[in-house]
Image: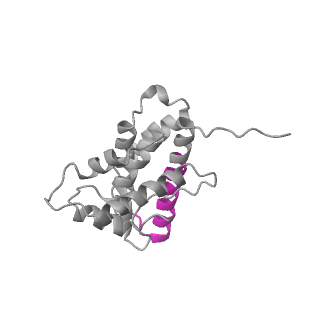
Amino acid sequence: MDMPAYTQVDEALFAGGSVVCAAECHGVLCGILCSSGSSDMQRWVRHLFEARTTDRDITADALKLLHEVHQCTLTEINHETLGFTMLLPDQAESMDVRISGLADWCSGFSLGLIMGGLNDKMLVSDDVREFVEDVQYISDASFTEVDSNPDQSEKSFTEIEEYVRMGVLLLNEELQPVSQKPTIH
């Protein structure tokens, strides 16, 4: 199963009256999964729509799409090939939209960690502790057009995005270690 497109998820959330964008929605889910090892789909969806801006019903198609995001994320975050993808605006979007999306994802991830029950005692390694602090810092990021070199901006953004992606996998492995299969000699 492939992750649904960012714009599809964003439109489904907006149509149902959610004030949460697709990036933040996915970040919350990933944070919950990392800190608790599981995610109650209904609780996650309730959170996404708790501050609704409309009386419109959440459609069955929107719920199906969110179920796909949930299932795909469950599979990817624990997959041995490290094929985890974050639900972020497409590369064709402007840099400010992409930075805002990554900041929203990190903000959602931080919230998801708390919703999943993360506490300081759970963060054993210094690397993971530092990563959680970095994610909070990145959630405050905004675009300023200081760098006139778009290639350098793209490179820097890609490095930060990859740092977050790998940090999520590291945090997930520390908090939810995959049980080792016995080696046969």
Quarter of the image where one finds residue 65: bottom left
Position of residue 116 relative to residue 94, above or below, is: above
Give percent across and percent down for residue 71: 46, 55
How many marks the image carries: the answer is 0
In the image, is residue 124 above or below residue 151?
Answer: above
Say which quadrant the C terminus sits in: top right
Specify the quadrant of the image occupied by residue 113: top left
| Residue at x 49% of width, y 34% of height | 129
Whether residue 106 is visible here, answered yes or no, is no
Place of residue 63 in the rendered image (x, y in percent of width and height, measured from the top left): 32, 60
Q: Report the front residue among 69 and 23.
A: 69
Q: Is residue 178 magenta?
A: no
Q: Which x, y percent locates residue 176?
A: 54, 38
**Principal secondary structure, stretch drawn in magenta:** helix
Read off the magenta span: 146-167
Residue 45: percent from left, percent from top: 31, 51
At a point 35% along the width and 38% down the height, the residue shown is 115
- 109 and 61: which one is in front? 61
Q: Residue furthest right?
A: 185
Residue at coordinates 23% horizontally, 57% vertically from top-left?
Answer: 18
In-image side of 107 versus 54 (left or right): right
The residue sitting at the top extreme is 121
- Quick check: 112 left or right of 130? left
Taking depth in this image into account, of 90 and 75 the one nearest to the observer is 75
Q: How is the image coloured?
A: one colour
**Whether residue 83 can be seen here:** yes
